[in-house]
Image: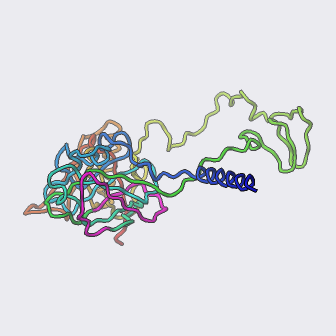
Amino acid sequence: MKKIFFSLLSIFFLASMFASSSFASSSNVNLIPKMTWNNIPSGIASASSSWSDSHQPWAVFDQSLNDNGWSTAVNGIPGWIGYQFEKPVVVNKYVLQARGANNYKAESPKDWTFEGWDGASWVVLDTQKNQSNWDQPVKKEFTFSNTKEYIKYRLNVSMNNGQNILTLGAFEMYNTNPVAPPTTPDPSTTPGSSTTPGSSTTPGSSTTPGSSTTPGSSTTPDPSTTPGSSTTPGSSTTPDPSTTPGSSTTPGSSDTDGSSQPTGDRAILTVTMDNGFDKEFDLSKKELSAFIAWYDAKDAGRGPSFFAIDKHNNNKGPFSNRKDYVIFNKILTFDVSEYSTK
């Protein structure tokens, strides 16, 4: 009886081990790589503003404790800091840590939302209020329910704990949802062989449904698919214009190759610079088309190195007109969100 009990216990233990190994969780893996600049080694770190070159957005993603971290400019509150992945990912947990400085308690976030970008707007995934108990080097974890993939996430802070700058020392993101392990391909369905349900075939041979073949027999190969054959000399195919050498597109933009034009009568143009800053402009269709035409021309080696964008309603002071000049080689990426006022 004792032997049976221990046998059953052993079986149960092994089954538990197998079950736990069948699903790997990424809960202990920070999804953001160790950053050494705003776009190195991958993704894009960005923020609403920065104090200086030594307080850039990437500093919260450098996996270094007690350094300067990130800081907004003076009076840069509300402010935000975020990270754009190379492809959409699920995030349902984030970790924050105050930076190593004398006034870190007053500089740290108090009220904020954690948001994901769905391609058109920011979606609030988590909301926090009255977070004032910051200690160094203690990490604060926040979890929430989410199964949707977003390509960009940000911490949007509406208030800190009293200082005139907003700072953060570390920012990590995680996916705690179980991830199914990769499945082992079924040898009976090895790519390259085809079978008809119910029939048996020799690997490499093709069969007509319902017919049977003798192992080792061969069928007459299709001349158009004979291995080693080539197409008729002189024949040509029309190249896909979307893959024509020389064409270029800007990652992250939905309409940046100049071949297609905006469909709405207005659009929000978001330009991410190489220092991680985002510049947003509310433009007409004509202005957006002019920007895209300039970018494509400069990408092909033609035209000026800068482009002037009218700031319109963002004009401040007694000026009749103000323009923002963007420099081509300072642009990391740009995003176009079209809308209609009709």
Quarter of the C terminus within the rendering: bottom left
Residue farthest to the left, as pictured: 318
Closer to the camera, 38 or 338?
38
Q: What stretch is highlighted in magenta?
A: 128-156
Q: Is residue 307 left or right of residue 102?
A: right
Write the residue at 15% across / 64% down. 162
Residue farthest to the front, as pictured: 2
Residue farthest to the bottom, as pictured: 342
Closer to the camera, 53 or 169?
169
Residue 156: percent from left, percent from top: 29, 62
Quarter of the N terminus within the rendering: bottom right
Write the residue at 20% across / 46% down. 68
Q: Is residue 52 left or right of residue 247?
A: left
Colour style of the rendered protein structure: rainbow
Residue 268: percent from left, percent from top: 32, 60
Residue 294: percent from left, percent from top: 30, 46
Residue 147 sits inside the magenta stretch: yes
Residue 228: percent from left, percent from top: 71, 27
Write the residue at 64% across / 29% down. 234
Q: Is residue 89 left or right of residue 313?
A: right
Write the residue at 92% across / 36% down. 214
Q: How many marks?
A: 0
Residue 129's place in the image compared with 335, above or below, is: below
Closer to the camera, 36 or 168?
168
Residue 10 sits inside the magenta stretch: no
Indicate the quadrant where residue 140 lies: bottom left
Indicate the quadrant where residue 120 lies: bottom left
